[in-house]
Image (cartoon, rainbow, N blue to C red):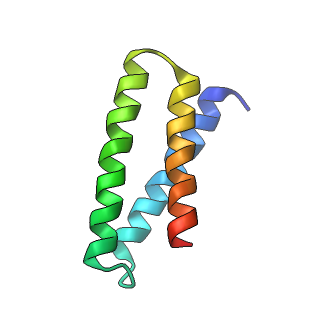
Amino acid sequence: MTKAEYIENLISVNKMIAEDFLKNPSFGIEDLERVQSKMTDLINQLEFWAEKDNKDRFLYELKNYINWVIKNYS
């Protein structure tokens, strides 16, 4: 698997997680606000590293966010 394919897979996983947050009634407003804040930070980081064409750091930020979600909400 190439790095680009790996990134695409992580982005797909991230989309599925986001959809689950929105559809899952067990997440309260505080949870959603916390995730929204982290997601905003993630988007800013991904935009920055994409502009710098730094796929390694882009990948790191995306994995870090997904790991945070898993640690806090699984």
Q: Horizontal and vertical percent for residue 50? A: 42, 23
- Name the one closer to the observer, 66 or 3: 66
- Give above or below for 73 relative to 64: below
Q: Please tell me in which quadrant of the rendered image residue 41 appears.
A: top left
Q: Quadrant of the N terminus?
A: top right
> What residue is at 52 percent from the left and 57 percent from the top?
68
- Would residue 18 be found to the left or right of residue 73 on screen? left
- Give above or below for 70 relative to 26: above
- Would residue 13 be found to the left or right of residue 50 on screen? right
- Give above or below for 58 relative to 20: above
Residue lying at the far top in this picture: please name it: 52
Q: Horizontal and vertical percent for residue 44? A: 32, 35
Residue lying at the far bottom in this picture: please name it: 26
- Name the one closer to the observer, 26 or 37: 37
> What residue is at 57 percent from the left and 63 percent from the top?
70
Q: How many marks?
A: 0
Q: Horizontal and vertical percent for residue 47? A: 35, 29
Q: Quadrant of the C terminus?
A: bottom right
Q: Horizontal and vertical percent for residue 32? A: 31, 68
> What residue is at 40 percent from the left and 64 percent from the top?
19
> What residue is at 51 percent from the left and 19 percent from the top?
54
